[in-house]
Image (tube, rainbow, N blue to C red):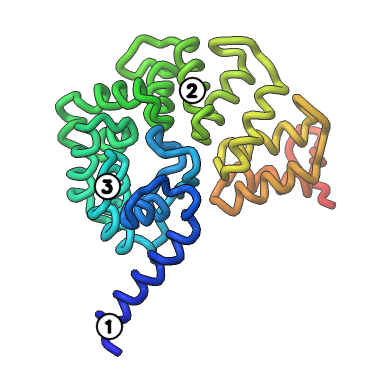
Amino acid sequence: MTAAWLKISIYSALSFAVLATYSGSANGQSADAVLCDRLAAYPSDPDKPADIKGVLSIAPGDIETAIKFCKQAKGSRRFSFQLGRAYEANGDTQAAIAAYRKASGQGSASAMSRLASLDKAGAQSGETRKMFERAAQGGDPVALNNMGMAYATGDGVPLDYTKARSLFQQAADGNNADAMFQLGMMTEQGDGGPKDDAAARALYEKAAARDQIGALERAGDFALAGRGGPKDEAAAKRYYEKAAALGSDDAKAALNRMKCPYTIKAKNGQRVTDLCF
């Protein structure tokens, strides 16, 4: 059995399995299109059909297959965008940029957003912000979040908390975890709209479910303090542990404080020791 025959057999088996999975929802698409969607569709892409789940990142073992079938898929700009994703996952930035440019030229908001992030020449010529603006207008959640950050910090645009909050809300509605976290912070602080601890807590918890580190930390803080809802030390510990596992030093410090909640100090106010349980 040759390696080439084995590879063809794997592709054939994968094609059969995916087509069987999507037999009721492929809407007459070719096998190439169905496979490209199965392996490389992005969950928040405004062009993605509702019955396709998408993947946040392309699995290493699927990259070569995704490139093969997304190259062959016809009929939608999203296939060029998804080809760009596959090239990017494969570490081929120039090929990814070329695919994103093709999709962007056809109006793909998600491709515009990724192209703005990758194209260094565009950043130097001032085209990056224009692409993010166009992508945001097209409803891309990543671009909406980036534009929200620009208005929240006054980066290249006038500082405008109200506009930033609106952009973060739109991005959060598109399931962007970073935007959920930023919107939670603005809601917690009352920037650009009403202050609401319960709503902020809900946003932190929603973003934390997507492993957004800042949201995991704030969800832990709110749960531990009973802010915006019931006090829940067990939930706080779980949030901190997850954030710590993802590399958060603040979460590690919070876990230590939970273990050692009392500090004994000398008369001069200097720390002597902590009481740990």
Residue bearing mark 3: 84
Point out which mark residue 170 bears.
2
Amino acid, disc 2: Gln
Would residue 265 be found to the left or right of residue 127 on screen? right
Q: SS for tag 2? A: helix
Task: Look at the image and tell me whether residue 273 can be seen.
Answer: no
Q: Are marks 2 and 1 in contact (CB under 8 Å)?
A: no
- Of label 2 and label 1, which has the lower sequence position? 1
- Of label 3 and label 2, which has the lower sequence position? 3
Q: SS for tag 1? A: helix
**What residue is at 46 percent from the left and 19 percent from the top?**
167
Point out which mark residue 3 bears.
1
Residue 95 at x, y = what percent? 19, 50
- Of label 1 and label 3, which has the lower sequence position? 1
Would residue 49 be found to the left or right of residue 256 on screen? left
Q: SS for tag 3? A: helix
Mark 1 and mark 3: span between their CA atoms? 27 Å
Count residues near mark 1 (Cα–Cα under 10 Å), then give few for <14, some for 14-19, many for 20+: few
Mark 2 and mark 1: span between their CA atoms? 48 Å
Which is more foreground, mark 1 or mark 3? 1
Count residues near mark 2 (Cα–Cα under 10 Å), then give few for <14, some for 14-19, many for 20+: many
**Quarter placement of the N terminus:** bottom left
Q: Are marks 1 and 3 in contact (CB under 8 Å)?
A: no
Residue 182 at x, y = what percent? 53, 26
Amino acid, disc 1: Ala
Amino acid, disc 3: Gly
